[in-house]
Amino acid sequence: MTSSIAPIQDRLAEADVAGITIVWADNNGIPRSRTVPIAGLADAAERGVGMSPLFAVFDSRDVISFAHGGLSNASGDIRLLPVMERVTPLAGQPGFAWAPGRQLGPDGEPYPYDQRSRLEAQVARAAAAGLSVRAGFELEFFVSRAGDEPAAAQQGPAYGPAALLQVDEFAAAVLRDLAANGVPVGQFHAEYGLSQLEVSLGPSDPVTAADRQLLARQTIHAAARAHGLRVSFAPMVTADGVGNGLHLHVSVSRGGDNLFVPAASGQGERGAGAPHGRRLPEGDGARFLGGLLRDLPAIAAVSAPSVPSLLRRRPGYFAGAYQFWGVENREAPLRYVPSSPFIGTDRANVELKASDASGNPYLALAVVLAAGLAGIDDNAELPPPIQDDPGRWSDAQRAERGLVPLPVTPEGQERALLASKRIGDALGEPLLGAFTAVRRADAAWAADRSAEETIAALRWRY
């Protein structure tokens, strides 16, 4: 091991790197880390870095919940191991490198609370079924002038080049630094919200996609600081704003064929409800989407789990307020994006819009894969898509379509999570228990506070 680490150490030393920051995301989606000097990298790669097991029960405000029986006291120690093939010198933080971390028990065995390994297990499950998965995140974030209070760094207009011009040097640094840090970018633009930008990351395998999401956030934070700015990826930055999503795109293939692309020989009956006569996924592609739709309330409880996530879940805000899917419908929490001859015949994917920075990216992807794979196994049915905003319908119209809202209270979200054995099994009993304890701690604290107070308390945690 030491000999294989030496070239990495030499490369980092040539780049004048002093320390390697090993990062993981907790059950609130908040990145946590340990930093080791470059001289200690070989030892860290061999034995890991010691850390408390209690990070699994940190709530969003760094308060430790002892309500989970498996982590009910301060005893114990685990090891944080850097993933060496992902070590990246940080373009925006000269002197430091970055690596994702894997949590192990003190005996070097897999740690049941390690979020990254839960995703790796689902990727292996997909591979065993002959499936490969590609994933990528879209990151929305608020850009503020430096300070504790949010102060818009640009005034729009939404989607306009003039909005980026107002933060021109920062925007250029984001693109340069992401490229230097090995994070591919599909596009970058001013978004709909006040002083809101969005960067779309290129697709990759699921574990790499989760790693890149964390690295991209670190990169953007550093670029903001260097230009006298501050950014927030929080689900809600102000109570009256549109909030930020970290939308998740996924595609699934077998033998190189994208399952979400309808077979050329299909009859197209499923396409009757699609816009412009487009045909819809069939076979295992439809079953995968059916599995996602079936478990969507439980998925959202993991991918957008915080109290601000629930405050953001409103009709008309593109946040996915109801349990349905649609074709290129941005109000749908599951948005099917079809292929076309122009953009590419194999580019079909599904976007989870009920996803934000408070969702651990590894767990979000793990439960999406678990639900979709179960849909294939169980022949889950996929109802017709909805191409409208159900928030504008009457109660009777929604009832006629069997349409129900996604949970908007912590209690409702917990019920949805615990009701799905498929999602519970994907997390594993220990991690599910810790995750639930953290959510209850957050909810209990927020219950005595206004929405504005809760949003303000978590604004800069992301």
Image (cartoon, rainbow, N blue to C red):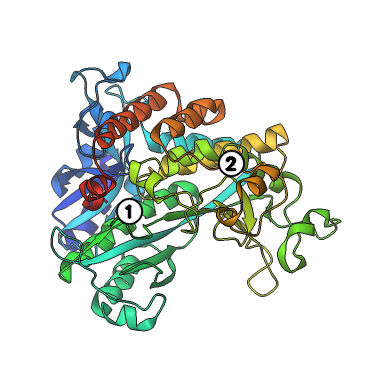
Image side of residue 199 versus residue 296, left or right: left
Q: Residue 236 shows which numbered tag?
A: 1
Pointer 2: residues within 10 angstroms few (<14), some, or many (20+)? some
Identify the secondary structure beneath mark 1.
Answer: loop
Earlier residue among tags 2 and 1:
1
Q: Work out whether residue 123 can be spotted.
A: no
- Separation of disc 2 and disc 1 at Cα? 23 Å
Image side of residue 315 versus residue 44, left or right: right
Q: Amino acid at mark 1?
A: Met
Vertical placement of 337 versus 130: above or below? below
Vertical placement of 139 versus 462: above or below? below
Q: Work out whether residue 177 can be spotted.
A: yes
Residue at 32% over, 78% down? 164
Percent across and percent down for residue 369 are: 55, 41
Q: Quadrant of residue 335?
A: bottom right
Residue labelled with disc 2? 404
Vertical placement of 27 versus 233: above or below? above
> Is 83 or 223 nearer to us in this picture?
223
Percent across and percent down for residue 113 are: 36, 28
Image side of residue 84 versus residue 414, left or right: left
Q: Quadrant of residue 160?
A: bottom left
Residue at 75% over, 58% down? 273
Percent across and percent down for residue 43 are: 20, 37
Q: Amino acid at mark 2?
A: Val
Specify the quadrant that holds the N terminus. Answer: top left
